[in-house]
Structures are given as structure tokens and as C-alpha cells.
Amino acid sequence: MHEMSLAEGILQLVEETAQREAARRVKTVVVEIGQLSSVEPAALEFCFAAVAAGGIAHTATLVIIDVPGAGNCIDCGLALPMTELFGVCPACGSHRLSPTRGTEMRVREIEIE
């Protein structure tokens, strides 16, 4: 389950930010996750709660923003929404799609006090 290592990476970033800003606690962590990123949001939430237990972010709420997938057909150039990495172009039937959005995962905001 790669969500555990992702949660650990998020927590490391959160803890570094909290330390740098001399925070007493972390209230909210907002994360953007692309639909094509192969990250399971529920598993990430579970893993984040597990790795944050006992630390400065132990009561933090993890908010996940779903980023829709999008891409282009390499053969005909059509820009299209994507719900899977290996789909079919509705215009030409090609399987050669190149994602342009939805593969990313990033921490967008950390709310501290």
C-alpha cells in the first residue's frame, strides 16, 4: 500500500512547516489528488491518521480535493476528460492517450495555530 509512504511524506512536510512557523497544532491539511494518480483517498485518510497519531497533527483534519483527469489523443489531437489512464479516444478509437491533468498529488494548504 503506497498510501502509507505518501501519508508519511505529507506528515513530514506538515511537521516541518509547523516547526518553522512555531505552531502549537495543525488544524487542517488540504491535499489535491488527481483521479489518475492511483491514490485511494480513503486509504490515504486512514494512513494519515495512523502516522499523525501522537504528534502535532494528531487532531488535524485531512481534506482531499479530487482533481479530474484530462488528456489529449496523440493520434487525432482531441482534448478529452479521462477517468482512466488507458482509455479510448471517442473521436478516432485510438488507445494512445496522453494525460495532461489528474496524475498529480500535492499538499495545497496547511492550517496551523
Image (spheres, rainbow, N blue to C red):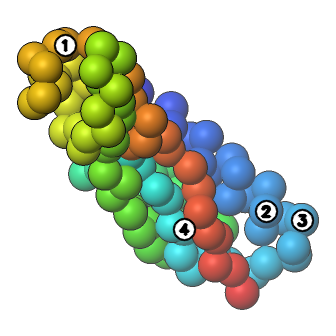
Task: Please tell me which residue lies in front, 34 or 16.
Answer: 34
Residue type marked 4 = Val
Horizontal and vertical percent for residue 103? 42, 36
Horizontal and vertical percent for residue 76? 28, 21
Residue at the spot of label 2: 17
Is 33 drawn above or below residue 22 in the view shown?
A: above
Horizontal and vertical percent for residue 7? 50, 44
Tell me if 93 is positioned left or right of 35 in this view.
left
Residue that appears at 41% across and 49% down: 33
Q: Few, some or many C-alpha atoms within 10 Å of disc 3 (few <14, some 14-19, many ≥20)? A: few
Q: Quadrant of the N terminus?
A: top left
The residues bearing labels 1 and 2 have C-alpha atoms spaced at a distance of 42 Å
Residue at the spot of label 3: 20
Q: Secondary structure at mark 1?
A: loop
Is 62 drawn above or below residue 66 in the view shown?
A: below
N-terminal of the pair, mark 1 or mark 4, is 4
Q: Quadrant of the C terminus?
A: bottom right
Dot label at residue 95: 1
| Mark 3 and mark 2 residues within 8 Å of each other at the beta carbon | yes
Q: Can residue 37 be seen in this snapshot?
A: no
Residue type marked 1 = His
N-terminal of the pair, mark 3 or mark 1, is 3
Q: Few, some or many C-alpha atoms within 10 Å of disc 1 (few <14, some 14-19, many ≥20)? A: some
